[in-house]
Image (spheres, helix red, strand yellow):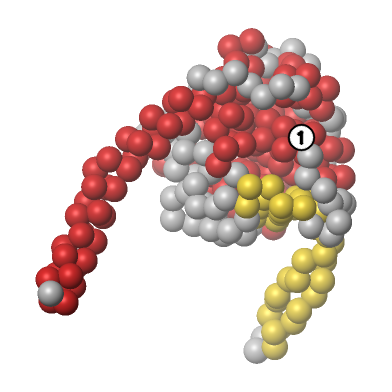
Amino acid sequence: MRAQIVFGVILAVPIAVLLYLLFGPAFWRWRRKRRRALAPPAGLEAMLTRNVPLYAAMPAELRRQLLSHVNVFLAEKNFIGCGGQEINDEIRYTVAGTACILLLNREPEYFPGFTSILVYPDTFESMDVQYDGPVEVHERTARAGESWHRGPVVLSWGDVIRGVTDPVDGFNVVLHEFAHKLDEQDSGTDGLPELHALHHYDEWTQVLSREYEALHKRAARGTNHVLDDYGLESPAEFFAVATESFFEKAKAMRTRLPDLYEQLRRYYRVDPATWNY
């Protein structure tokens, strides 16, 4: 009898895995489609109109898409207050509505690989590890946000609300950290997200590498006006910073950095330089 039970368990495991591989993705697509069809939560539209000017600026069809994506996002992500921060609908709706701007005009996966969003009241401290030769140096630094690889997003609510309510300052910690989450969906956080077609990769690499080097030169001359100098930290940070400016300094990027703007327009499948803000 014991042998039969063991054999049954051994047989059941690969069958369960096979069934998941065959039907799991279809189930998730079906469930997300149902959630997108639901009416938005009470107060969501009013909250986004007040807190997220980018939402009010985009065309009506994109606003409808965004609300449907927020339904899924809120169902799949868990908000956790840290440092005394209590989670309320303003936090959930503002963060979700801003993050989902990155998902428009596509069949999204809703930032896979993590479920938790940690929210502090304001700037928080994080431990940086650097190396001076063989010596490991630990240093605490103040952060507005973090995205842990295959882990949570960490946000300062004070920095979130300051960034999202000003749609033209080029600072939006939610767009920045969730751009990192898009970036890590393929093989790692390296400034090269999963693009929509194979033939896009060569041009993306050429343009973003060139603009990354150009940012170094502009920063040295003090003539950088579109991208924040924090983009110099790494190609991954360059992509996240460029994402912030693509949405918040769209007209300036389209004029001054047209090749970079076109790559991001093709990737995000929206044209924020034409939005009404």
Q: Is residue 208 left or right of residue 82?
A: left
The residue that appears at 53% across and 48% down in the rendered structure is 183
**Between residues 33 and 97, which one lies in front from this camera angle?**
33
Compared with residue 259, is residue 151 higher up or lower down, i.e. above or below?
below
Query: x, y (%) of residue 260?
Result: 60, 34
Query: x, y (%) of residue 65?
Result: 57, 20
From where the camera sits, is residue 253 visible? no
**Between residues 6 and 207, which one lies in front from this camera angle?**
6
The residue that appears at 60% across and 18% down in the rendered structure is 39
The residue that appears at 44% across and 55% down in the rendered structure is 187
- Report which quarter residue 167 is drawn in: top right
Residue sitting farthest toward the top:
60
From where the camera sits, is residue 111 visible? yes
The residue that appears at 12% across and 71% down in the rendered structure is 4
Is disc 1 placed on a helix, strand or loop? helix
Query: x, y (%) of residue 245?
Result: 72, 34
Q: Is residue 66 left or right of residue 81?
A: left
**Quarter of the image that includes the C terminus:** top right
Q: Is residue 151 left or right of residue 139?
A: left
Badge 1 local density, few (<14 within 10 Å), some, or many (20+)?
few
Q: Is residue 249 left or right of residue 23?
A: right
Give the total of numbered labels. 1
Residue sitting farthest toward the front:
1
**Mark 1 sits on what residue?**
89
Query: x, y (%) of residue 181?
Result: 57, 48
**Quarter of the image that includes the N terminus:** bottom left
Q: Amino acid at mark 1?
A: Asp
**Between residues 236 and 216, which one lies in front from this camera angle?**
236
